[in-house]
Image (spheres, rainbow, N blue to C red):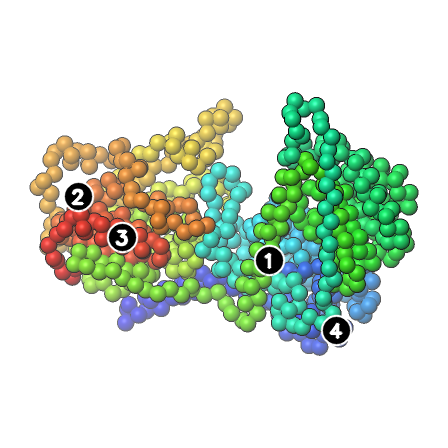
Amino acid sequence: MEQNSTMLEYEQVLQKKRTSHKLSGFEAGALNPKLFKFQEFIVRRALSAGKYAVFADCGLGKTAIQLEWAFRVFEKENKPVIILAPLAVVEQTIEQGEFFGIPCKNYDGSNFPVQIINYDQLENVDTDIFSGVALDEASIIKHHEGVYRNLIIDKFKNTPYKLACTATPSPNDPMEIGNYAEFLDVMGRNQMLAMYFVHDGGETSKWRLKGHATKSFYQFVGSWAIMLSKPEDIGFHMDGYDLPPLNLIDRQIVTQQRDNGQLFNDTAISATTFNQELRLTKIERMEQVAEIVNSKPDESFLIWIKQNEEGEYLRSLLPDAIEVKGSDSNDYKKKMLLGFAKGDFRVLLTKTKIASFGLNYQSCHNQIFASLDFSFEALYQGIRRSYRFGQEHPVNIYLITTDTMTNVIESINRKQKQFEIMQHEMAEAVNAHLNNSTLSSVEYDTESEKTEWYDIRRGDCVRLIQGLPDESIGLSVFSPPFAELYTYSSHLEDMGNSKDYKEFMEQFGFLVRELYRVLKSGRNVAVHCMDLPIQKGKEGFIGLRDFSGMLLRLFEDSGFIYHSRVTIWKDPVVEMQRTKALGLLHKQIKKDSTMSRVGIPDYVLIFRKDGERNDPVTNTDLPVDLWQKYASPVWMDIDYGDTLNVREARDEKDERHIAPLQLQTIERALHLWSNEDDLAFSPFAGIGSELFQALKMKRRALGFELKKSYFDVNVKNCKAAQTEHAQSKLQLY
């Protein structure tokens, strides 16, 4: 009965690790009849969630969706809702409101149902009066250290209803999704990084999505977002949403030989020399632009430039062109940007950072990028001003490049492929959630490999240990997951798959209490660990977490006696080279020595189960000189390279951290605290280091491992150990 109660409690802990978004909204009644069916579907899901993200491609009516959402929130709460939008989009949104019969006007701080303001004026907004906020072109918050990102999250922290809309949620890196999750109060960015991403050392801002966590990550996103490039993606017909052909026309300019001491011009300009290269090639590029525009005198053109000098020169070549610059007044910008949409003039010159978001230019089907840069998002969003649903003509996109921009083109192509892969994976996983699926434990088949000398089982160690007899283990030696520092699989049961150290310790406690039950009276548990670095990119500061102390307290609370501690010396120079830790860099001494620290050693914590020893551990073969080495509180001679081969166990795009416990450390623990024929146990068997060494030392071996790739290598290693050291048959229990 007690065991059943324990497992019920354990299952409840696993359930708490699930990250599905809790609904906080309401069910809406009849919606605006002018909405398309797929738009109505999205509005209802967003209202039901309360806080939601709409990642929909350009032209799918995000403006109509957010207007309807905002108005229904106003009706429910009788408090106004505010929409934040790029400058020129404000007026287009108000016009859309008139079309749909939704009262919308510029922000004035009144109780008017739906108010709108551009992002530049956000600091002047009294957010307390609003029941909801919608972000039009929400990718403005994608940068973790961006001004708008922090301002928006802080100012609307207590707003009950939130909506984020964009076509490009993470054009550069899936990590950017964390900013939307934090804005929507789903999960903090740092918490998301800990759960689904891995940091490989070095630059603290660089995190990558774990290969094995990809599906789980996008399922998590699907619990609070929807993604679509076309209505068909979410099960609706495509009538009226067919796009015309898109023609990408490359016009490459061959540059004249420069006096650079080389036979050829450099074809790979860097970000630092990019602007200089634009100035050197300005005349050739702008004359090419003018030639294209003049070849079609009856058609309108949207021309994207990078530098003010380009606009100045183009106006001399195209007298009828209107330029919109960043220095222009807001009123002038709005007038000209909207005027071009209405056909008031034929040619518009501007920059992507001014007009590439939110504006509808289906009236124009010719665009020229007078220069490319390294931003795929700018290119994509610029193109989608014209190439969007409702466009009736084939869209021509002229790309003016030079033979010195090969790496720019390669960068854009790489980002485009990454974006398309991410868009596909995300849409597939996100929209699977539309069937009300929730995050769940990844299913896996349990399996085992058993001989007269070893027993290896694949599965959850907490569940598997329930089947072990009381007082059957002679010694347990293992290296547990280091809290939330590394995640090895997508299983909820994986203790490394924890959002923080508190969640880890809660789950790990179930194992420790069972270890006490299955360990023989008077016998020992040897736990390998280290104190854990706290990374600034994750928690906002640099420091250390007393992981060894946490483990000590947990084992004591579970009934164990703290027996002793061994410190394993590590070379700080090697650690510095591997981790690039700020505190170990010599230059930090000169800059600010208060941030310098010593290297982080490994520890072996030894715990004992009190009680009568029916079979004491006798070491008659241990000479005094070797005993003195073992008895030292610091083991200075552990060879860090003395490990089993791990290459076969590493999954593609998986975690890089596979660091088996050194065989010398395991050998000493086995020698000191176990007898021959004892059953040595590792609940985190990994690739089999503890089992391998136990077999070599004539111990029987029992190990549990959750991850398939590790289990398979574990079996190979144990077979090799048994073959090498053939022994007489023994019964495990």
Disc 1 to disc 2, C-alpha distance: 55 Å
Q: Mark yes or no: residue 15 visible.
A: yes
Q: For this rendering, which residue is in front, 496 or 452?
A: 452
Disc 2 to disc 3, C-alpha distance: 24 Å
Q: For this rendering, which residue is in front, 511 or 703?
A: 703
Name the N-terminal-most of marks 1 and 2: 1
In the picture of the structure, the residue carrying the numbered disc 3 is 716
Rendered-image quadrant of the N terminus: bottom left
Name the N-terminal-most of marks 2 and 3: 2
Name the N-terminal-most of marks 1 and 3: 1
Please tell me how crowded label 4 is: few (under 14), some (14-19), or many (20+) other residues with Cα within 10 Å.
few
Q: Amino acid at mark 3?
A: Lys
Residue 32 is marked as: 4
| Marks 1,3: beta carbons within 8 A | no
In the picture of the structure, the residue carrying the numbered disc 2 is 671
- What's the residue at 28%, 68% (across, down)? 2
Rendered-image quadrant of the C terminus: bottom left
Disc 4 to disc 3, C-alpha distance: 64 Å
Image x and y of residue 449, in percent: 25, 60
